[in-house]
């Protein structure tokens, strides 16, 4: 078996997944939360194959959770190892051949999965200035994991890497060029692991050559981004220097006139830190309607709430604007795919965001779109010029695949 342990280390959390990559099966997973706080939360899940020896769906075998103080990421890794030892699956019976790490920001330096060395750790640390909320936690996880698993290779898979194919015209901001170079100001893009996975899965599902397709992928979750993919490469993406730019999100504003910040600093006496909090944590759907979950927005809209209706309309308006722009950049589109929590589950969002694209040959089958299902599914009408798909994302599997490819 080609078993890979995937690590996603946050500032106060550790998410992990043990995957049999050959069979594309998750053997076990867990989430350790509130690291460094008075009481941590530990959740661990074990799965088993319904048909051992064959690629097959998995069934839930055991879920375990408890609460305890967890001082730091080193202790979190000890807790994770204990979960595997006590509840399974056994790491002795399923030894990982490598450890894959999600790293949010690779800057312009990393464009592929990279085997982690001391110098790579130094580079990730140097990039903290570009991702002060994410890279420190990613690095803490890497260091703890390398201490716990010193005998196997560790690979960093960067959220930004897929977007390193952007042309200068797509990634450059129209500001003072010397200042931009000095402070590494450019569009980097995020959610790259998901966009890569979904675009490749879409091509495979359709039985078409990835290199010939013009695709648009909508990753719509609490964080949301859109990417134009030509021939398997990212050519345009909505998130920019940070994950704040672009679409309306659960708590993030997306695009906004920068002068709004100057005005709020002058008239509301908001500091830089307060403005950062406003745009990242108190805006988007939450800022407009008081709720960040699209399910709550849809329920409020159905009940006739003005704030929920406006928030939804702004959300859809922004999606349509980006779709039109990306179709223009690609010179047409062959496939549009929806993924992540909202993209995979909110039929209304899918239908409304595409409603004005009939002139481009985009036609959604209402019955297919409304039907819930698992796995990849087509929701476009028979004979439509543009394929519209729902493609569940699997970033852990993609990280595991890239990890194996790098060693």
Image: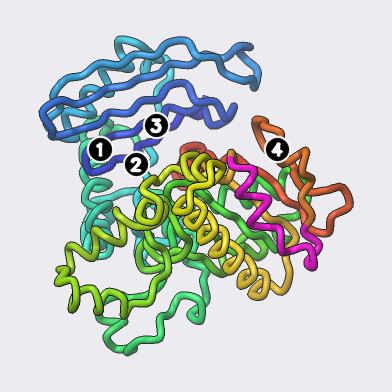
Distance between the alpha carbons at the discs numbered 4 and 2: 42 Å
Q: Which residues are magenta?
A: 346-362
Residue depicted at x 68% and y 48%: 202
Can residue 284 be seen here? The reply is yes
Badge 2 local density, few (<14 within 10 Å), some, or many (20+)? Answer: many
Q: Nearer the viewer, mark 3 or mark 1?
A: 3
In front here: 156 or 242?
Answer: 242
Return the disc, 2 or 1, that comes first in the chain's sequence. 1
- Residue that label 4 marks: 370
How would you classify the magenta stretch by its main secondary structure? helix
Badge 1 local density, few (<14 within 10 Å), some, or many (20+)? Answer: some
Return the disc, 4 or 2, that comes first in the chain's sequence. 2
- The residue tagged with tag 3: helix, strand or loop? strand
In front here: 177 or 247?
Answer: 247
The image quarter containing residue 361 is: bottom right
With respect to residue 348, does 23 lie above or below?
A: above
Residue 179 magenta-drawn? Answer: no
The image quarter containing residue 68 is: top left
Name the disc covering residue 220, or none.
none
- Circles 2, 1 touching at the beta carbon (< 8 Å): yes
Q: Position of residue 380 (x, y in %)?
A: 78, 48
Name the disc covering residue 5, or none.
3
Distance between the alpha carbons at the discs numbered 4 and 1: 46 Å
Residue depicted at x 77% and y 43%: 366
Q: Nearer the viewer, mark 4 or mark 2?
A: 4
With respect to residue 335, does 22 lie above or below?
A: above
- Residue that label 1 marks: 146
- The residue tagged with tag 1: helix, strand or loop? helix
- Residue that label 2 marks: 154
- The residue tagged with tag 2: helix, strand or loop? strand
Q: Nearer the viewer, mark 4 or mark 1?
A: 4
């Amino acid at each position: 078996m080609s078993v890979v342990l995937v690590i996603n280390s946050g500032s106060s959390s550790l998410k992990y997944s043990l995957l049999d990559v050959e069979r594309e099966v998750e053997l076990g997973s867990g989430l350790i939360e509130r690291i460094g706080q008075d009481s941590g939360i530990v959740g661990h899940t074990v799965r088993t194959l319904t048909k051992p020896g064959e690629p097959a769906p998995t069934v839930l075998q055991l879920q375990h959770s408890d609460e305890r103080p967890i001082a730091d990421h080193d202790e979190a890794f000890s807790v994770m190892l204990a979960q595997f030892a006590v509840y399974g699956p056994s790491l002795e019976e399923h030894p990982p051949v490598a450890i894959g790490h999600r790293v949010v920001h690779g800057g312009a330096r990393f464009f592929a999965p990279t085997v982690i060395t001391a110098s790579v750790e130094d580079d990730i640390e140097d990039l903290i200035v570009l991702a002060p909320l994410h890279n420190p936690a990613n690095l803490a996880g890497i260091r703890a994991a390398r201490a716990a698993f010193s005998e196997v290779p560790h690979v960093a898979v960067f959220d930004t890497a897929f977007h390193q194919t952007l042309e200068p015209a797509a990634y450059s901001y129209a500001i003072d060029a010397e200042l931009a170079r000095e402070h590494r100001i450019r569009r980097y893009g995020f959610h790259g692991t998901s966009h890569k996975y979904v675009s490749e899965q879409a091509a495979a599902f359709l039985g078409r050559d990835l290199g010939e397709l013009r695709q648009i992928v909508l990753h719509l979750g609490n964080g949301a981004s859109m990417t134009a993919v030509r021939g398997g490469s990212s050519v345009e993406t909505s998130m920019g220097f940070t994950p704040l730019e672009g679409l309306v999100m659960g708590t993030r504003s997306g695009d906004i006139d920068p002068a709004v910040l100057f005005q709020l600093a002058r008239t509301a006496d908001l500091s830089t830190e307060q403005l950062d909090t406003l745009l990242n944590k108190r805006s988007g759907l939450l800022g407009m309607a008081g709720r960040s979950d699209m399910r709550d927005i849809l329920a409020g809209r159905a009940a006739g709430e003005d704030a929920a209706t406006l928030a939804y309309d702004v959300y859809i308006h922004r999606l349509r604007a980006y779709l039109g722009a990306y179709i223009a950049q690609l010179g047409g589109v062959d496939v549009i795919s929806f993924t992540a929590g909202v993209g995979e589950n909110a039929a209304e969002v899918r239908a409304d965001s595409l409603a004005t694209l009939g002139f481009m040959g985009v036609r959604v089958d209402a019955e297919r779109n409304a039907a819930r299902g698992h796995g990849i599914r087509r929701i476009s009408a028979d004979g439509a010029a543009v394929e519209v798909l729902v493609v569940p994302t699997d970033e852990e599997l993609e990280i595991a695949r890239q990890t194996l490819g790098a060693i």
